[in-house]
Amino acid sequence: MNSAAWPGGRIFTGADGFPAAESGARTDRREEMTNDTIAAIATPPGTGGVAVIRISGPDAEAVLKKVFPRASFTHGQMVYGSVRRNGELLDTVMAVLFYAPKSYTGEQTAELHCHGSAVGVRRVLGYVLECGARPAEPGEFTRRAFLNGKMDLSQAEAVCDFISASSQAGAKASLGQLAGKLKERVLSYQDRLTDALARVEAVVEYPEENLEEEVSEELLPVLKELQKGLLGLADTYRAGRIAKEGLRVAIAGKPNVGKSSLLNALAGMDRAIVADVPGTTRDTIEQGVDIGGIMIYLTDTAGIRSTSDEIEAQGVKRSENAINESKLAIFMLDGSGKITEEDHLAMRTLKKSKADLLVVLNKLDARERLSEKDVKKEFGVLPLRISAKTGAGIDELKQKLLKYAEQDKTAGELLITNERHVFALRRAAGEIGEAMEAMEQGIDMDCVTIDLNAAWASLGEITGKTVSEEIIDRIFTKFCLGK
Ligand SMILES: Nc1nc2c(c(=O)[nH]1)N(C=O)[C@@H](CNc1ccc(C(=O)N[C@@H](CCC(=O)O)C(=O)O)cc1)CN2
Ligand SMILES: Nc1nc2c(ncn2[C@@H]2O[C@H](COP(=O)(O)OP(=O)(O)OP(=O)(O)O)[C@@H](O)[C@H]2O)c(=O)[nH]1
Ligand SMILES: [Mg+2]
């Protein structure tokens, strides 16, 4: 049943047939939040080709006409002119006006495309504020777009993720959501719930017809399928999170096996010092590498061994920390030597951590001493053979890393990249589970209605239909200024 796990309670808008518990709240808040005119610099701070000032709200046209005197504007058409304050030229700019509701925010919106001078654009913004706009808060333009129904909450969140994406995979995932993929999926799930609710309500409405069993039989497989879909989508979060945030990988093993050489080979540059002296790497070294569009944050660690050297011991401690903070650890063995007690010590350290393990056998170019079978016998895993020195096997290793990162992701599919969405999907799946249980046990259909409504509301948290104001605030204040 409805476990209102989200803090602050929910606001039900009453749309889409959902009971309107507090339908007035959103409207008042919407008016309160969109009745003035806001302005901000929309481009990043610093020097650039062009800097854009955005103005949105009921007075956008009036403000624009004060700073950029002109009799009339044509919707969406850029015009060239000057911004003067008391006769003093502040900049020569391009200006454009979008009339409501055909704009990004859904309000009257103006843009001033200034020269990309940090000083210049700030002076123009100062003048815009003098002319009747107030400074926008972070994310306020997109918040208005959301409040005006230009996008749902999942799309607004995707705008934020897209502009802060640090990898191709992250950009692709957020762009799909920005285009409405997640929204549409959630709406179609809600549609199916609404259909099911209608059937259940018929049973409640006409008890004399004894439809209970027939409807249960009809709905159980439908709900089961729906639940499966929700959980499957939630499971893409593993890959989605890696697409968005990258993957942390530690390279670990005893001293001198070639860990730093592997970091350099994967990074394609001489990042870490390599030497034929065990204990060369003292401190952990981090390097981000783009592998197949995914950011892999590699940490080269000090070789693990018991040592009386105080500095080296600190390095080993740092290696352990790095391994604990990584999702995956590459356990490296030296194929040109024998397996030693130090290898076992390193393996024990790795096993103590939560990191998944990938075993590589390095120095395959050297005269072979260790075979894959030896490693399998000793550690129970078949290693990947590589040579950090010649680069042999490095492409295969990259493929393995990529496959690990994309596990649970099926081609071209929608990826969940947000923990908030995972919670909502899992909760909805749980509530559907309870509805099914109630049906199977022949419990009153009223209970089934409550559970299915709860599932509908949980899904509505993703689109923003049934979410508390606190959550919305939290989402938009994470945005950057001008978005
Ligand atoms: N100059 C400029 N470039 C930009 C933006 C912007 O606001 N200004 N965007 C902002 O982040 C992004 C584009 N997103 C936008 C989304 C919707 C609308 C818009 O005006 N929508 C209207 C009309 C659509 C139409 O004419 O077909 C609407 O939805 O009603 C504009 C930009 C990226 N580039
Ligand atoms: N033949 C051969 N030598 C390698 C290979 N990889 C590394 N080496 C050599 O092994 C030695 C140690 O390499 P490093 O990369 O510094 O090893 P490490 O594991 O980082 O060592 P520590 O930092 O001391 O823990 C160097 O002399 C490397 O040139 C390889 O694939 N083949
Ligand atoms: Mg090293």
Image (cartoon, rainbow, N blue to C red):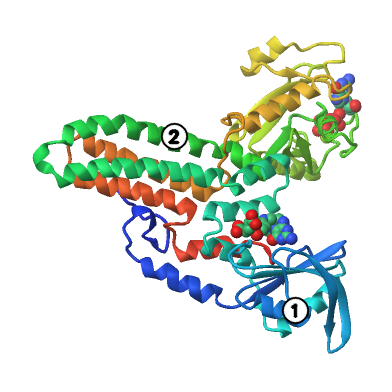
| Left or right: residue 352 compared with residue 61 | left
Alpha-carbon neighbours of circle 1 within 10 Å: few (<14), some, or many (≥20)?
A: few
Q: Residue 304, located in which quarter of the rendered image?
A: top right
How far apart marks 1 and 2 lie (CA) works out to 56 Å
Q: In this view, does 237 lie above or below 8?
A: above
Residue 119: % across, % down: 86, 74
**Residue receiving disc 2:** 229
Q: Quadrant of the C terminus?
A: bottom right
State how many labels appear: 2
Residue 127 in view: no
As drawn, the label of residue 54 is none
Asked if ligand 1 lies within 8 A of label 1, the reply is no
Q: In this view, does 63 lie above or below 176?
A: below
Residue 476: % across, % down: 58, 63
Residue 69: % across, % down: 78, 80
The tag earlier along the polypeptide, 1 or 2, is 1
**Nearer to the camera, 322 or 97:** 97
**Nearer to the camera, 112 or 153:** 112
Q: Which residue appears at 39% of the width and 35% of the height?
A: 226
Label 2 residue SS: helix
Specify the amino acid type for callout 1: Ala
**Residue receiving disc 1:** 71
Q: In this view, does 7 lie above or below 406?
A: below
Specify the amino acid type for callout 2: Gly
**Nearer to the camera, 20 or 7:** 20
| Left or right: residue 186 compared with residue 211 | right
| Left or right: residue 123 compared with residue 129 | right
| Quarter of image, ligand 2 | top right
Q: Which residue appears at 58% of the width and 34% of the height?
A: 413
Label 1 residue SS: loop
Residue 474 in view: yes
Q: Which residue lies furthest to the bottom in this view?
A: 86
